[in-house]
Amino acid sequence: MPYGISLKCLNETASPVFKLWDEAAAFEETASMRTLNYPPHLTLAVYQAFDADRLGEALESVFRARSTVTLAFSGIGYFQNEFLVLWARPIPDDALLQLHAAFHRKIDPAFCHGHYRPGNWAPHCTIAAKVPEAKSAAAIKWANENSMQFSVNFDAVDCVRFPPVEILSEIRLA
């Protein structure tokens, strides 16, 4: 099973993301994000197979003394995979990019999934992961018309194994 490293929001500032989850779920057969039983998040790294203890050590090294990461979001983006993926678009943030790079300095990026490596990573907060092709056009229209702006305080970081999501280690940010 793959492993992920994610910043996540465990506080009330997640409410705009929950609202987007519910709106975007209208394009899915099943509400993909609600069924995860995992909070709004930004994935920083994904490893197909790796030593979970080493990931936890890197997490501890980079994030133990970090404070909450506040990101502003503006608009909805999408990726075309097997399904259309809709995501909230964070406004570019140097501090987030520096945290991402710091984590990848602890573990060789060659071990990480290509989309999450420095230089390839597109920061995003997924709001729907399984929009079928039949509803893609309507979902893209909705995404392009949505100009919702909000901020989220990401107050924890964790290492998970998935699916289903199993938290292996977690750090609460100050």
Image (cartoon, grey):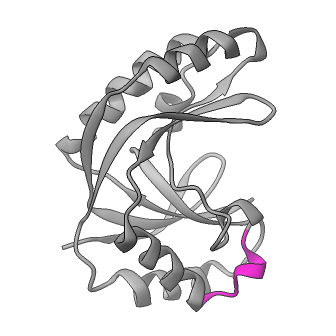
Q: Relative to 75, is 115 above or below?
A: below
Q: Residue 12: in sight, yes or no?
A: yes
**Residue 62 belongs to magenta span:** no
x%, y% of residue 155? 26, 61
| Of 124 and 94, the residue lying toward us | 94
Q: Residue 56: in sight, yes or no?
A: no
Report which quarter residue 153 is drawn in.
Answer: bottom left
Q: Count the marks.
A: 0
Report which quarter residue 118 is drawn in.
Answer: bottom right
x%, y% of residue 79? 67, 37
x%, y% of residue 156? 32, 64
Q: Relative to 116, is 36 above or below?
A: above
Quarter of the image with the N terminus is bottom right
| Of 13 and 54, the residue lying toward us | 13
Query: What residue is drawn where x is 45% and y is 43%?
Result: 89
Quarter of the image with the C terminus is bottom left
Q: Residue furthest right?
A: 82
- Left or right: residue 63 versus residue 48 is left
| Of 67 and 140, the residue lying toward us | 140
**Residue 107 belongs to magenta span:** yes
x%, y% of residue 126? 52, 40
Give the residues drawn in magenta, as a range.
Answer: 106-112
Query: What residue is drawn where x is 57% and y is 28%?
Result: 32
Query: What residue is drawn where x is 68% and y is 64%?
Result: 120
| Of 111 and 168, the residue lying toward us | 111
Query: What residue is drawn where x is 24% and y is 46%?
Result: 151
